[in-house]
Every structure is written in structure tokens, then in C-alpha cells.
Amino acid sequence: MTFMTRRHFGRLAAGGAALSAQSPTSVVDIGQRRELFVDRYLVDRLAGSAALRLHHPQSREIVLVHDAEWEGTGSGYHSVFQDGGLYRMYYKAYHLDISSGKMRADKHPGFCCYAESGDGIRWRKPNLNLVEFQGGKANNIVLASGPFHGVNLDAAHPAVFKDENPAAPANARYKAIVRSADRKAHGLFALQSPDGFRWSPMITAPVITNGAFDSQNLAFWDPVSKQYRAYWRAFTEGVTNGEAWKPSGLRAIRTGTSPDFLHWKQSDDLRYVDSPAEQLYTNQVKPYHRAPHLLIGFPTRYLERAWSPSLRALPEPEHRQQRSGASLRYGTAVTEALLMASRDGVLFNRWNEAFLRPGVERPGTWNYGHQYIAWHLVETKSPLAGAANELSLYASESYWTGDSSEVRRYSLRLDGFASINAGYNGGEIVTKPVRFEGSHLHLNFATSAAGGVRVEMQTPEGRAIPGFAEADCDETFGDAVDRAVSWKGSGDVAKLAGTPVRLRFVLKDADLYAFRFAESGK
């Protein structure tokens, strides 16, 4: 199930019924921003077969193998972002194995390494000549664990980003959060760089200290709230009644904000809408680039399964037995990725249905460390000529099972995390009252050849606005990420801009992923 329960949906009225009994006082100003159906924020009513549906990334190629001598089976915690015409990737280089019933990670120190790509699909590991390894610098290492300009870094826990804050100085255009390796200086260090390669501490004391940090901890500039946000690992509290948290010692996520990346305000533990208390390792939260008012996260769900015929039937049982010899959970734990979204940075709608399952059984899968999604997604070209761009996500594979670990790319349509879906018998969604800017309504949608979408513009009380009723709307069908809607041949809705309206979407064998208003119908 998703986080959407019957308690949230309430009673569903018949399609097209007026909403006169409902108070229209609450109006949401959406301007021209793109709105996605990753939550119920704008959903007032669903009827017929309409329901929120979670969509899943499609498996693509292996894009990177961590097989260098300074990498290994424990490599992961990838940070991925587009920087002009270049795609950048930073990650931990680490090796784990089992020897004499013990977990060993002493083959080499932990490193932060770098890879890059011109298209987000074909990646390379350039020789940076920055950090010495076994007597030479011909490697892609950016940072090494140990003493570093007055701090003691654990370079195997990095999160790197390009700072989009327009006030960021040139020498701090790139920033990173890296865990301290010193127990006496427990916490997260803030690093800065002018180019993503030459790094220095912003200060020599940890900037965040109230957490566990044994995960990928991260921070970024929030262009909507005009402040920095951080999300990090903590042992905290469990959810109760979908609203409050009670102590339970779960692996969980904590957040805080800062005006300058150095001084962080009082932190909050994340809260969820109708999600059970679960162990969450990573968080992978960042503003979605096509709708930055939405913070999208891909936390890793960690589960310890008891020994059973099914567990023993999973791939690479000998590795599982070896890992259990060091610690039971190393062999019995499995991981997968979830999807969550927030508009305030603290309360998240977390889909309880897995976003990225472990998938078909094969070597390197269904183990502890599998399907950790990189921070974050990027936009790449579709392999289909003439098709719209798609989203690329990257996830770990073969973690801790052989001689190296791998990164597999997954793809998803733009805005395609979730949709309002209706079957052939039809369904509809009515939004809360909204106030928009612009002259045309655009949809991201997909239908069958027999399906379609119609839109009715309504008053806040639920009455069809003359000229914009369902009967006036030209049926929209096809599969496009940006198509303008029209009524009797005209898509101009400028006269309704600035006034509260409801949108009624009538769907038949269709998915509606997102909508926005714009100044043009193109």
C-alpha cells in the first residue's frame, strides 16, 4: 500500500457532483509552478477508478564498476549532479570483506573519489593526480581519510554538491558534508572548493553534532526558502498515529537549516503521513529541479529477515553465510529504496510501497547495501529518437559480495514518480481551490489510444465556469510531458488568472503526472 489510506480519501462523490457543501475559503497560490502528484496536497476529491499510483524506475545499464585497487566492495554513497554540460559523481571508495569470522575494512583507507560523464550514461574515472595511493597519484581520488588541514576526515562518508546560492563566494562554489573520523570531534565537517577538486575546511570544528552519522549525510541550498538544509542519520523516535514520534531507537532521519552552512538551527526529526516506524538508512533529499518547492527523497529501507527457506534461496548464499559469521544481520538484512516528498522539509509523504525493489534475483542483489539510490537524480536524453528527456537515477549493486561493487542506471519519465491513474471505466480528480498565473494549462500525461483527459475549470463552490466545462474541453490524448489543454479550440485561460478556481480532471485509461500554468500554449 501507499501512504494514501481510506481515512485520507473519505467518501468519494459521483463524478461531476457540485461541491457547494464544502468551504472554499482555503486557496492555494500555485502561480506558474509545476505541481506533481507525489502527495495529496492539492487533491480534494477522487472519484470513480481514480487513485494515486506509484511508478517505478526502469532498469538500464551498469554505468560504473568500482574495481580499482583503491575502491572495492563497499564503495557507494554516490553524489550525482549536472554541472553545465558535465555530469559529476562523487562517492566513497571502500572495501569490505569477511576474514576469520570478522568484518574487515582495512585493505586501504576510505576515500572520496570522482567520476564524470558528458551524457549521464557513459561515465569515466579521470586521473586527477591529487592524492597519493601506494606511491602514485594516477587515480581519481579527491579526498583521503585522515588528517586534513586541521581536521580528521572520514572521507568514506561524503556528500558533494554545487552550491546554487547566488551569494556563495567563488572559493566555495562547491561544498561538501563529510563525517569526522575523530570520536572527540564527533559530527559533520563543512568543506568548500572553488572547482570540486581542491578542498579545504570552512572551519575546523564540526558544524552538526547531534546525530549518529553512519550513513550518507548531506546538505544543499534550498532556492525556495533561501537557506541551507541538511539531512543526516540519527537514532531517534518511532511514529505513532501518523503524527507524533515516541522513543524506539530506530535508524531515522534528522534535519536542520542554516543561513550560512556553518550555524545550524534547532533540528527536527522527520515526520511522516501514515507510514509505519521503519529503519531508514539514507535519505537522499533534494529539491526536484523541475519543481523546486518539492523536496524529493529516496531513503533506503533496511530490514532484517529471519533465516528461512526464502532467505536461503536468495542469490549468493555462501556470501550471506560468511557475512552472518561476522554478525547475523550482515547476512539476514536486505535493503531497497523508497520515495518520499515534502513541502516544508520536515513532514514527508512517504510511499510505503517500495519505489525501487531489489528486483529479479541475480548475483549481486537482494543483500545488505543493494539499491542505495545516489543523491540525486539528473535529467538525461532518451534513447528513443525524438522522445522527451528522461530522469536517470543510479543505485548500488554487488555491494559486499565479490571483488568490487557496481552502479546501475535506472530511468523514469520526467515528473514520473507518481500519477493520478484511472482505468478504462474512468475516474476523476477535483483539486482544492487554486490561484494561478499565466494563460495556458499544460499537462504531463499518458493515455492509451482509446483513453483521454478532459479538464473542467470550476468555481471554488464546484460549479463549471461557462466556456470551460467538461463538455467544452477538447479531449487530450497521447503521451507527452508538456501538452496544452484547449476548450473548443482555444487554450486561453488568462481571464481566470488570479481568481480562485478548482480543476476537475476527467480521466479514461490515463495517467496524469503533473500540471502547470504558463504564459504560452507552446
Image: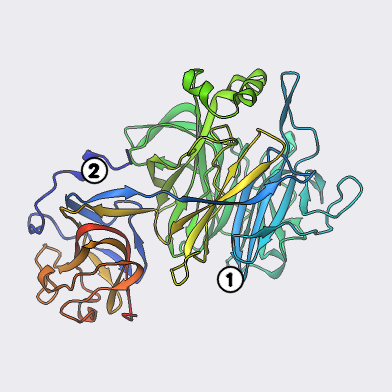
Looking at the picture, does residue 41 appear above or below residue 70? below
Q: Quadrant of residue 429?
A: bottom left
Could one spot residue 189 in this view of the protein? no
What's the residue at 11%, 56% (across, down)?
A: 15
Tell me the element at label 2. helix
Residue 376, horizontal then vertical, whole percent: 54, 54
What's the residue at 31%, 62% (across, down)?
A: 446
Location of mark 2 (residue): 8
Q: Looking at the rendering, in which quadrant would you find the N terminus? A: top left
Residue 107, horizontal then vertical, whole percent: 80, 34
Residue type, mark 2 in image: His
Assess disc 1: are there few (<14), some (14-19) or many (≥20) residues with their C-alpha within 10 Å of its C-alpha.
Answer: few
Does 64 sit left or right of 383 as displayed? right
Assess disc 2: are there few (<14), some (14-19) or many (≥20) residues with their C-alpha within 10 Å of its C-alpha.
Answer: few
What's the residue at 19%, 51% (across, down)?
A: 46
Residue 100, horizontal then vertical, whole percent: 76, 19
Q: Nearer the viewer, residue 253 or 34?
A: 34
Tell me the element at label 1. loop
Location of mark 1 (residue): 166
